[in-house]
Image (tube, rainbow, N blue to C red):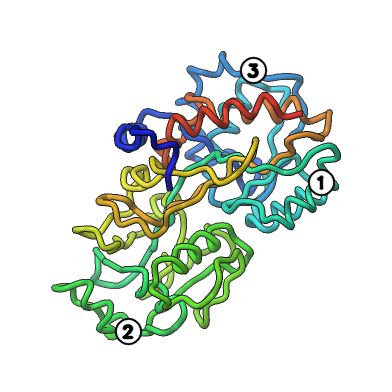
């Protein structure tokens, strides 16, 4: 992914890595309106900045969609709710596909989606955004971990073609030569692979399959899609469901956001991208990729183009951006003020720092600044 380069790409890369612990991050979404154990900690980290949150008129704000941002929204709701007691943020999960559908039905003020709106979805949004249309605002950076549960195996290296073949039931045993070649010296069991994928339409699936389409050397023959198309395997609902299955089922493998991998103490595979050494699934390595982001949207739409095929040293290729889908114009008058207030907080330095320790990847400052400029213009 590439932002404006103009000789600044190196500086952006350095800055993005540093931002993992200090810079702004933005996200959205949770499956319910409760505060998790992570949320209480985050409330403390956001408390110092609570006085600076502009609460607006208050009221109830409804959102739905991506489960990738569940842990982030718990953090934000705790801090925002503490500062703005007259406002209630309610976010229902169900996946990116369900969120976009509810947004285009006028049921929610914003939707969380891990993939940008398709042209048909933008067109459909015009019926709800009476004087405008739906736009994509990147709010949380993350990465997709290939999580595994294989007895006796603590570290695992995979590459694009091998991941594709595993999730399409072309490789069915853990000691398959393709896996063994990537893991010299590792004792792999002669056991069937239990591959677990999402059952719901998912932006996480869209990003994974987008990666496989670009990095599998043709092994993945399906188009990138929110709907799972691979053969075989087991399915689970939401990132939480996939995490639970991998944790419980021996010799299993799945894909979830880093936040879920950390929360469930799951092991993540390193990816052989063609760089000098395999790249671990860490926020720092994903930040290296985000530093080269390129905006693909036009006007106030800030959809990003992701370079899944990167071979840059230390660049983790399986990155993910969760967008807040909102109307650029034509938002409902009774929720617009609270919507802008909440998004202003989530994209602020304070909001981003509050979730930086929860497995999310800080957005580069230049990109965050672009989002910060768009939010006040929503009408």
Residue at 26 percent across and 63 percent down: it is 274
Residue at the image point whose x is 79% and y is 53% from the top: 124
As displayed, is residue 248 above or below residue 85?
Answer: below
Say if residue 274 shows up in the picture.
yes
Give neighbour class at mark 1: few <14, some 14-19, many 20+ (Cα, 10 Å): some
Extreme residue toward the front, this view? 6
Is 125 located above or below residue 151 in the figure? above
Numbered mark located on residue 126 in the image: 1
> Foreground: 174 or 26?
26
CA gap, disc 2 to disc 1? 51 Å
Q: Name the residue under label 3.
A: 54
Give the image location of residue 346, x and y in percent: 56, 31
Q: Judge the density around disc 2: few (<14), some (14-19), many (≥20) Cα neighbours within 10 Å.
A: some
Gap between marks 3 and 2 measured at Cα: 56 Å
Q: Which residue corresponds to the image point at 54% horizontal and 51% vertical from the top-left?
A: 68
Where does label 2 land, which residue? 191
Tell me where residue 360 appears, x and y as whole percent: 44, 42
Q: Nearer the viewer, residue 114 or 236?
A: 114
Farthest-out residue, top: 51
């Amino acid at each position: 992914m590439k932002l404006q380069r103009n000789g600044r790409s190196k500086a952006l890369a350095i800055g993005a890595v540093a931002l993992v612990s200090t810079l702004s991050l933005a996200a959205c979404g949770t499956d319910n309106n409760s505060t998790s154990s992570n949320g209480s900690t985050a409330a403390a980290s956001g408390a110092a900045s609570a006085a600076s949150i502009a609460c607006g008129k208050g009221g109830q704000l409804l959102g739905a969609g991506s489960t990738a941002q569940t842990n982030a929204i718990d953090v934000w709701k705790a801090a925002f709710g503490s500062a703005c007691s007259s406002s209630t943020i309610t976010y229902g999960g169900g996946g990116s596909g369900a969120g976009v559908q509810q947004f285009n039905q006028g049921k929610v003020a914003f939707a969380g989606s891990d993939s940008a709106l398709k042209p048909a979805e933008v067109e459909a949004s015009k019926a709800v955004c009476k004087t405008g249309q739906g736009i994509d605002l990147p709010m949380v950076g993350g990465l997709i971990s290939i999580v595994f549960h294989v007895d006796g195996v603590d570290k695992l290296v995979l590459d694009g073609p091998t991941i594709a073949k595993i999730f399409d039931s072309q490789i069915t045993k853990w000691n398959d030569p393709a896996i063994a070649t990537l893991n010299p010296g590792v004792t792999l069991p002669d056991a069937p692979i239990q591959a677990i994928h999402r059952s719901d339409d998912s932006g996480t699936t869209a990003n994974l399959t987008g990666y496989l389409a670009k990095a599998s050397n043709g092994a993945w023959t399906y188009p990138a899609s929110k709907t799972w198309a691979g053969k075989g395997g087991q399915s689970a609902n939401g990132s939480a469901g996939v995490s639970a299955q991998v944790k419980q089922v021996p010799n299993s493998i799945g894909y979830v956001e880093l936040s879920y991998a950390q929360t469930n103490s799951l092991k993540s595979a390193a990816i052989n991208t063609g760089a000098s050494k395999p790249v671990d699934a860490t926020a720092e390595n994903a930040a290296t990729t985000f530093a080269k982001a390129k905006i693909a949207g036009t006007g106030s739409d800030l959809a990003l183009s992701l370079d899944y095929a990167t071979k840059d040293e230390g660049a983790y290729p399986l990155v993910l951006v969760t967008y807040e889908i909102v109307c650029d114009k034509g938002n409902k008058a009774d929720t617009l003020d609270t919507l802008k207030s909440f998004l202003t907080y989530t994209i602020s330095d304070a909001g981003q720092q509050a979730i930086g320790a929860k497995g999310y990847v800080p957005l580069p400052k230049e990109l965050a600044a672009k989002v910060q400029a768009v939010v006040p213009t929503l009408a």
